[in-house]
Amino acid sequence: MPDKEFEADDPYEFVAVRFPVAPGVDGDALTARTFIEEYALLGTPREKMFQLFASPFFAGTHAILRARGDSFVRAIIEEVFGPPAREV
């Protein structure tokens, strides 16, 4: 249904909430890793993964990028995917 109009009370609208974590737990790192792992399992290649954080249309991931920076996000992407393959 690509022609479906937006409904203000759409029951399928994604709603995110924050909750407190224990002291010393890095909630941003856990959240970023969860997003990266989920999209990786859906087949998103590592080359496109950073775009999920760079795009303001993805509010949750973009907020992490703004708060923690490029290197933080790229480090977690590398943890999930492993280091990039070297060209021979």
Image: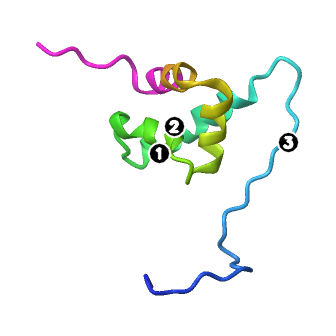
Residue 22: quarter of image: top right
Q: Nearer the viewer, residue 62 or 82?
A: 62
Return the x and y of residue 53 as percentages of the image width and height: 53, 39
Q: Nearer the viewer, residue 80 or 51?
A: 51
Q: Disc 1 marks which amino acid?
A: Tyr
Q: Nearer the viewer, residue 62 or 14?
A: 62
Return the x and y of residue 62 as percentages of the image width and height: 60, 41
Confirm whether the magenta stretch covers residue 85.
yes
Return the x and y of residue 59 as percentages of the image width and height: 63, 49
Mark identifier at residue 6 = none
Determine the CA span between mark 3 and mark 1: 22 Å
Residue under label 3: 19
Determine the CA span between mark 2 and mark 1: 5 Å
Q: Earlier in the sequence, mark 3 or mark 2?
A: 3
**Which residue appears at 83% of the width and 17% of the height?**
24
Crowding at mark 2 (Cα within 10 Å: few <14, some 14-19, many 20+) = many
Above or below 21: residue 57 = below
Q: Which residues are magenta?
A: 76-88
Q: Disc 3 marks which amino acid?
A: Phe
Confirm whether the magenta stretch covers residue 48.
no
Residue under label 2: 36
Q: Earlier in the sequence, mark 3 or mark 1?
A: 3
Whether tag 2 and tag 1 are in contact, CB under 8 A, the answer is: yes
**Which residue appears at 55% of the width and 54% of the height?**
57
Determine whether, in the image, residue 72 is placed left or right of residue 27: left
Return the x and y of residue 75 as percentages of the image width and height: 51, 19
Residue 28: quarter of image: top right
**Which residue appears at 74% of the width and 54% of the height?**
16
Element type at marker 3? loop
Residue under label 1: 39
Determine whether, in the image, residue 17 is placed left or right of residue 80: right
